[in-house]
Image (cartoon, helix red, strand yellow):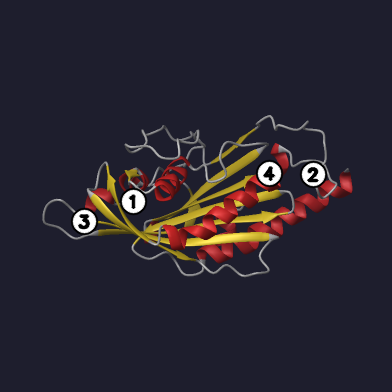
Amino acid sequence: MKAIASGLAVVGLLAASACTAAEPPEASAPAAAATTAERAAPADPAASPGTSGIPPLTVEQAQAALIDEGDLGVPWTATDGTATWHDGLLKAATGQADCQRLLEALYTDELLGAPAGPRAATALDDGDDAAQLRYQVDASRIADVERTLAWLRTLPRTCGQFTAQTTAAGTEAVRITDAGLPHDLGDARQGLRMTLTAQPDSAGEPTTLTLDVAVVRVGDDAIVLTAGALGTLPDDTTQQALDIGVQRLAQVREKGRAQA
């Protein structure tokens, strides 16, 4: 459907939605810049070290750990606008609780929930493939990250196939499979490959969004990545972004350890 064609922009850091809404979540305004950062007061004192014995990640360190267009190469660029498939295909409702929770977490960019500490995020566009990638570094509590990883691991079974009603593209069929991330990527990880296919109400071709979702824990911190494209994602984009990102976050933390 041409109406879902990609126009690209910053995916904002939004407040998390309720887990099982009966109606699709309301739209929220995107952030105003390609890279965003925020501070959130953690439940524990900010000065206390993480389990690795080094001080918690700062906003500046989180920003330094982000990837950029230079890491992925041509045709990736800094984001230029919200991909219309974000509202068109992720803003949807289903009667299955875990599946609804996932759709809302993806729509609001809150897979880990509300931030427990400093967070930085950036978005990149590939105009050639109508693709957009959102990359986030989050100083979350390890227990929270591990709970999210455990939940994500259940989704290929509990939400392997389901249907949802979108606000803009009618009924869509959703399929979720395990993305098979390498076992040596970070300290813990889980990836999903999703396909969301909207059937138009009137005569026309179905629209398919291919979406990679990944959460990787690196020590006390987490990387959250979503990468989507209408049709097929560029080869190796997700793996390349995560490989570079994990190495960069580890380097930032090692530098923080040396300066502590």
What kind of element bears circle 2?
loop
Q: Residues under labels 4 and 2: Cα distance? A: 15 Å
Q: Nearer the viewer, mark 4 or mark 3?
A: 3
Helix or strand or loop: what does disc 4 sit on? helix
**Could you tell which of marks 4 and 2 lies nearer the N-terminus?**
2
> Which residue is under mark 4?
62
Q: Are marks 4 and 3 in contact (CB under 8 Å)?
A: no
Inspect this view and state whether residue 156 appears.
yes
Residue 206 screen position, x and y as percent: 22, 59
Q: Amino acid at mark 2?
A: Gly
Which residue corresponds to mark 3? 199
Sequence-earlier tag: 2 or 3: 2
Residue at image coords 42%, 42%: 104
Residue type, mark 4 in image: Ala
Characterize the local packing of mark 1: few (<14), some (14-19) or many (20 or more) Cα atoms within 10 angstroms. Answer: many
Residue 98 location (% of width, % of height): 44, 49
Question: Which quadrant is the C terminus positioned in?
Answer: top right
Image quadrant assignment for residue 25: top left
Task: Tell me the distance, in whole angstroms, between the alpha carbons under discs 3 and 1.
Answer: 18 Å
Q: CA distance from mark 4 to mark 3?
A: 40 Å
The answer to whether marks 3 and 1 mark residues whose Cβ atoms lie closer than 8 Å is: no
> Crowding near pointer 2: few (<14 within 10 Å), some, many (20+)?
some
Q: Amino acid at mark 1?
A: Ser
- Which residue position is annotated with label 2? 50
| Mark-to-mark CA distance, 2 and 3 | 47 Å
Residue type (three-letter) at the residue carrying disc 3: Gln
Mark nearest the camera among 3 and 1 is 3
What residue is drawn where x is 67% and y is 54%? 217
